Amino acid sequence: MSGEPLRHHGRFSYRPITDRDAWRWPGNTNLAIYVALNLEHFEFGQGRGPGIAPPAPAGEPDVLNYAWREYGNRVGAWRCLELFDALELPAGVIANSAVLDHCPALLDAFVARGDEIIAHGHTNAARQGQMTRDDERRMIVESRQRLAAHLGQPPKGWLSPWISESERTPDLLAEAGFGYTLNWAHDDRPTPMRTDHGRLWSIPYPQELNDIPTISTHRVSMDEFCDMIRDQFFELLEQSRDQPLVMGIALHPFLVGQPFRLRRLRESLRELAGYRQAQGVWWATPGRIASHVIQMSSHD
């Protein structure tokens, strides 16, 4: 009815960015920045395809899109690992549990660096928001348990395949023991979310500085994408003088791991990597960011 309040998700209240926090990130820094690398695996010939190029006709295996994605696991991700090593940058590795069946050595290589592993469902061939409650709960729990068994400890954070949620997803994540989600891209600061099982933190995850929507969907060039990264960094660094902020860079190795794109990414990240604690920059992972805000909130 006209004039009535619109339906609301109820997970958090409105808070303007001008309502500033007084605390700072570790080392008295202002801007927390992280690189997120997505490791994904798709079922061949079944389920939702990646759709980088127009999909194959029904009944025909989508070899083009499948192989394009697979390049990321076989080549691109390893090149990104070498780049992060060279620049001494931590990474938040967002991984389908199906990676453990397909290419566990790739996940192990990032674990050996000390990178954070973030749960990303079982496979991006399925949309979480279309599952029944029981199926969604089972998928969340099994994804967490499989990664925990392989890593020796459960992952703290979650990003849904395709960032697909049902209305119950935050409740199921908190119930399963997750401390934070990357699904919501509504702020430059972490946000506590209300669930049926206590607080779940939303850590900012980018939809603009994200190579899939930017490069693949909007057809932005790699030069433009790297300009976006640079401009975002310096603008947020300036804004963060008044309050602690978060900047994420979301990457998929089948895109940025292509040699011509990797070259530009290396140049861009090399410039940003020169900014460290002395310049007010904290290179982190989503899990470290979540741990810090949980600590700060306990003092409130």
Image (cartoon, rainbow, N blue to C red):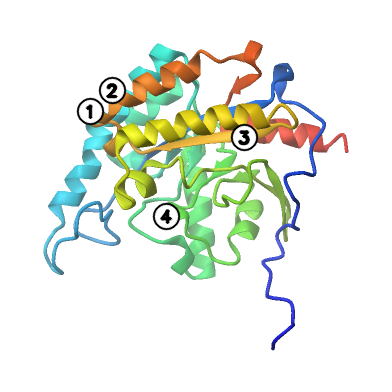
> Which residue is at 65% across, 11% downward?
278
Determine which residue is flagged by label 3.
246
Camera-side residue of 69 and 232: 232
Mark 4 Cα-neighbour bin, 10 Å: few <14, some 14–19, many ≥20? some
From the viewer's perspective, is 123 left or right of 229?
left
The amino acid type, in three-letter code, at marker 1 is Phe
Q: Mark 4 points at which residue?
A: 162
User: Quick one: 142 or 256, which is closer to the camera?
Assistant: 256
Q: Which residue bears the numbered disc 1?
A: 260
Of labels 4 and 1, earlier in sequence is: 4
- Location of residue 29 by image quarter: top right
Tag 2: residue type? Arg
Q: Is residue 183 visible?
A: yes
Location of the N terminus (image quadrant): bottom right
Circle 3 Cα neighbour tier, 10 Å, few/some/many (<14 / 14–19 / ≥20): many
Residue under the image location 36 percent in, 51 percent down: 123
Real-space CA distance between mark 4 and mark 1, rounded to the nearest whole angstrom: 26 Å
Q: What element carries label 3?
A: strand
Q: Residue at x 62, y 27 (%)?
A: 237
The Cα atoms of the two marked residues, 4 and 3, are separated by 22 Å
Q: Distance between the residues labelled 1 and 2?
A: 6 Å
Which sits earlier in the primary sequence, circle 2 or circle 3?
Answer: 3
- Residue 148: % across, % down: 52, 37
Callout 2 secondary element? helix
Q: Nearer the viewer, mark 2 or mark 4?
A: 2
At numbered mark 4, what does the secondary structure look like: helix, strand or loop? helix
Residue 103 visible in the current orientation: no
Disc 2 vs disc 4: Cβ atoms closer than 8 Å? Answer: no
